[in-house]
Amino acid sequence: MAQVLEFKLPDLGEGLTEAEIVRWLVAVGDVVAIDQPVVEVETAKAMVEVPCPYGGVVTARYGEEGTELPVGAPLLTVAVGGTGAPEELAEAAPGVGRADVDAAVSSEYSGNVLVGYGTAGPAARRRRVRHANPAAAAQAPAAAPAPVAAPAPVAAPAPVAVPAPVGAPAAAGPVPVISPLVRKLARDRGLDLREVRGSGPEGLILRADVELALAALEQPVAAPAPTPAPAAVSVAAAGERVPLRGVRGAVADKLSRSRTEIPDATCWVDADATELMAARAAMNAAGGPKISLLALLARICVHALARFPELNSTVDTAAREIVRLPSVHLGFAAQTPRGLVVPVVKDAGTRTAESLTEEFARLTEAARQGAITPADLTGGTFTLNNYGVFGVDGSTPIINHPEAAMLGVGRIIPKPWVHQGELAVRQVVQLSLTFDHRVCDGGTAGGFLRYVADCVEQPAVLLRTV
């Protein structure tokens, strides 16, 4: 007979522990095919569509749009057919006709949960099931017993997290916490997580629960004060509060970790980019695919890293070792509607200027469309940051942890410059290098930056054997 199966938020990889529901792609009563995308979620790295491994009728959804769920929390339930006729599926979801469920009973489960890992067959067109009784959809989950106890649907009010009474006996066993960052927050502030009630599924402790408990513990005990006048409003409470989560939260965590763990230093130099701009114009005038300026700067970085491999490395703090990496996986900063992301061009050292141009364009477009994958945002060994596109000359880049260095490039603008002994107007750019002082000293960093500047001023330097 038909079964009601629960589909939980899958592990999206790359160490991600939660995701925010951006948009539901199905509604209660819809017929879904195996591996059909059912919800669009935003993680700390990318926006992804999550496919359901079951084919059947959606009987319940858990979580409204904008809700952040931990990995393993229920997303929806699906009534799937057994070995019998499609009528069994219709019985599990009252109001569903045979014509709407024929495609759902041919197979029940694919075992795949991630985008790009589904079955080869095309997803069936989504169909909205019309119920004779408007309450049928809401009652559908109760028509068949679910194998796993599910939390209340989105219509039910969420529990409010409050700290356990002082002196209450602590529960034995492990404490379910949404992420290591939340556990660290509690540990740093001296809060015993066993005294906190979680508002997440099955009592999972969220960051908001810990913050609420800390606020309650830190509130001073004082004599009752007269009720303040309505005009006495806290200035801080009047400001707009923006949740620090998703991409913005991930960036904040990474930058904070970089500044906390890495003893960085910055050096910079002005360079005459006139010859580089002329070389690019000549290459593009010769026909063929256009070469971007970022691709030429990437080629320069790759050559410089071959001469100064100390900067293409990372620090293993546990082993107290510097790990020099064999390949250059070049990250580049890209501004998107979701915030700043750093896509990574894998094996940049083996690519031509044309190949680099194509890959930069592909990754940038995917990032702006929100379709970039977590794999495209990880694994970088060195970052190139062209902040000149924002109209600024210089900056002190923050290293993209756990990398060892970042090269920043300002805008290229006409400036007075002494060229061949005479004052002339040249195309000048400021180059900034922020580096991890643990992996090298100023001599190495200065040598790297000077070589980059020499290649910018005289592109023919790249024709030499590295």
Image (cartoon, rainbow, N blue to C red):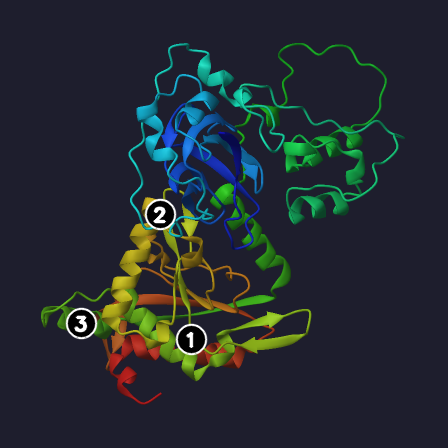
Q: Give above or below for 187 relative to 265.
A: above
**Quarter of the C terminus within the rendering:** bottom left
Amino acid type of disc 3? Answer: Ala
Mark 1 → mark 2, Cα distance in angstroms: 34 Å
Q: Give above or below for 80 relative to 424.
A: above
Please state the horizontal and vertical placement of residue 63, each as a whole percent of the image. Answer: 52, 29
Question: SS of the residue at dot 2?
Answer: loop
Which residue is tagged 3? Answer: 278
Quarter of the image for residue 394 reads bottom left
Amino acid type of disc 1? Answer: Leu
Q: Which residue is drawn at the image coordinates 74% and 43% (left, top)?
A: 186
Mark 3 → mark 2, Cα distance in angstroms: 35 Å
What is the number of callouts on the image? 3
The residue nearer to you, when weighing 427 against 439, is 439
Please state the horizontal and vertical placement of residue 364, each as a whole percent of the image. Answer: 32, 54
Of the residues under marks 1 and 2, which one precedes in the sequence?
2
Residue sitting farthest toward the bottom? 465
Q: Which residue is drawn at the image coordinates 74% and 10% (left, top)?
A: 227
Amino acid type of disc 2? Answer: Ala
Which residue is tagged 1? Answer: 449
Q: Give above or below for 314 relative to 203.
A: below
Q: Residues within 10 Å of mark 2 (few under 14, many from 20)?
A: some
Quarter of the image for residue 343 reads bottom left
The residue nearer to you, when weighing 256 against 272, is 256
The residue nearer to you, when weighing 299 against 387, is 299
Question: SS of the residue at dot 3?
Answer: helix
Which residue is tagged 2? Answer: 371
Of the residues under marks 3 and 1, which one precedes in the sequence?
3
Mark 3 → mark 1, Cα distance in angstroms: 21 Å
Residue 379 makes an appearance in the image: yes
Please state the horizontal and vertical placement of residue 181, each as a whole percent of the image. Answer: 65, 47
